[in-house]
Each structure stands twice: as C-alpha cells, then as structure tokens.
Image (cartoon, coloured by chain):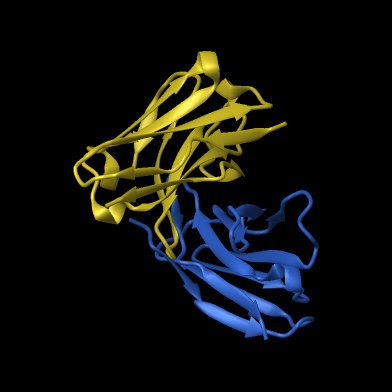
Chain colours: A blue, B yellow
Amino acid sequence: DIQMTQSPSSLSASVGDRVTISCRASQDITNYLAWYQQKPGNVPELLISAASTLQTGVPSRFSGSGSGTDFTLTISSLQPEDVATYYCQRYNSAVTFGPGTKVNIK
Amino acid sequence: QVQLVQSGAEVKGPGASVKVSCKASGYTFTGYYMHWLRQAPGQGLEWMGWVDPNSGGTKYAQKFHDRVTMTRDTSITTVYMEMSRLRSDDTAVYYCVRDVGNWNNYWYFDLWGRGTLVTVS
C-alpha cells in the first residue's frame, strides 16, 4: 500500500513569509496528488488537484508542484487566514492522505 | 444550493452498529460517486470507501470491508454508511464527500458534508 508522508508536521511563520510544505509518496503516483486546507473547526477544502492545478476561487498565492514521489505546496506570502492544517492526498485509483501539516502565524 | 447534509451525532456502546445518512441536494445525485472518510479526534483523514449512487456499486477499504456497508436511496437522494461491531477506536467524525468526477470516479473530493460525530463509549 502506498504511504504518504508530510514535512514538517507543523510550522510557524510570519505574515508575508513564503511557506513550503512537502509531501512524499512511497511509490510513484505520477501527478495524482491533491492538496486540501482544513481551517480550525471547518471541513477540508480542495485547493489543488493534479499536483499543480489550482481550484477555482483559491488565491493565487497558493501553488503546487512535483511529480512522481515528491510534491510541494507553497504559500508565497502567508496571510492570517491561511492558518490551517494542510493535507496531501494521493488518488491513483485509491485514496491515502498524508498526516497533515499545521500552519500557524508567528 | 449544492450541499451534503449529514445526520446528527451518535453515541453507541462497544459492539453496537451505527448508520449515518447524507442527503445530497442541488446537483444530479446519480452523477457523482460518494465517498466516506473519517477523522479521529486530533488525527488525520482516513478513506473508508465509496458508493456509486447510480448503480449502487461499492468499494471499501480493506480495513473496513467486513464491518461497513454503504448504500443509497435515489428516491430521497441520500447515501448511508453503516458500521457494525463498533470499538472505542471508531470514535471519529464521519464525512460524506462527493467525488469531483461527473459520471466518473476520480477519487478526490470537491464537496464535503459537515461531518457526523460518532462516539463509542
């Protein structure tokens, strides 16, 4: 079974900082990778699919990259409303989520 | 309004069963696979399976295949997830989530229910 890992597990950054979250698959998943944002007390929301396709309405400061086994979610300029836990998910005919990365404001 | 409305919180004893409902509205119910996920307190997300509202077909995660049944009632645009032989580690929020694919299963999700807390104690 394919395992998904994320790093770091949590981070604190200042408003305006560039934030990078990594996601790694234990096997090649080509680009079958989605990112979700779960704000405190809310349900997750889809940010990115196919590793780099931004969903409609998602701010352009979010971007995704990678293929194969290594993927990255980048927030180019962290905003207070970005405080959340971010999950990666592989979806090549099965579903596995990463353990999540909690993002806070310093 | 496109939404998924789930049934209310449940408290069950060990060994009991629970059935959670999820009513879909605002879109073509039979056109989108519905998946079930769960999230234990303070933990990440775990996929449980899917039901095809059109055919009634299902696929379950190996971990749950002998305890979970997912069904649908097209007349009331509702899907159900029933879990038997509950244990304390089944305490979690259970989500129904819509697959993004129209008449296809893409295995990722664009619409979430608010979740149903199931407590096993």
Report the quarter where the C terminus of chain A lies.
bottom right
Instruction: Please give the name of the residue rendered at 73% of the width and 65% of the height, measured from the top-left corner.
Output: A62
Position of residue B84 measured from the top left corner of the image (x, y, whole percent): 25, 37
Is residue B52 visible in this depiction of the protein? no
User: What number of labels is visible?
Assistant: 0
> What is the quadrant of residue A67 in the picture?
bottom right
Query: x, y (%) of residue B20?
Result: 41, 35
- At a point 60% along the width and 59% down the height, the residue shown is A35
Viewport quadrant of the N terminus of chain A: bottom left
* Image position of B58 (left or right of B27): left
Above or below B6: residue A82: below
Can the viewer see residue B71 in this picture? Answer: yes
In the picture shown, does residue B37 fall above or below A87? above
Q: Position of residue A29 (x, y in %)?
A: 48, 56
Between residue A38 and residue B50, name the one nearer to us.
A38
Residue for point 48% across, 48% down: A92
Q: Is the residue B121 above or below the residue A85 in the image?
A: above
Residue B62, image x, y percentages:
28, 44
Residue at 72% from the left image edge and 72% from the top image edge: A75
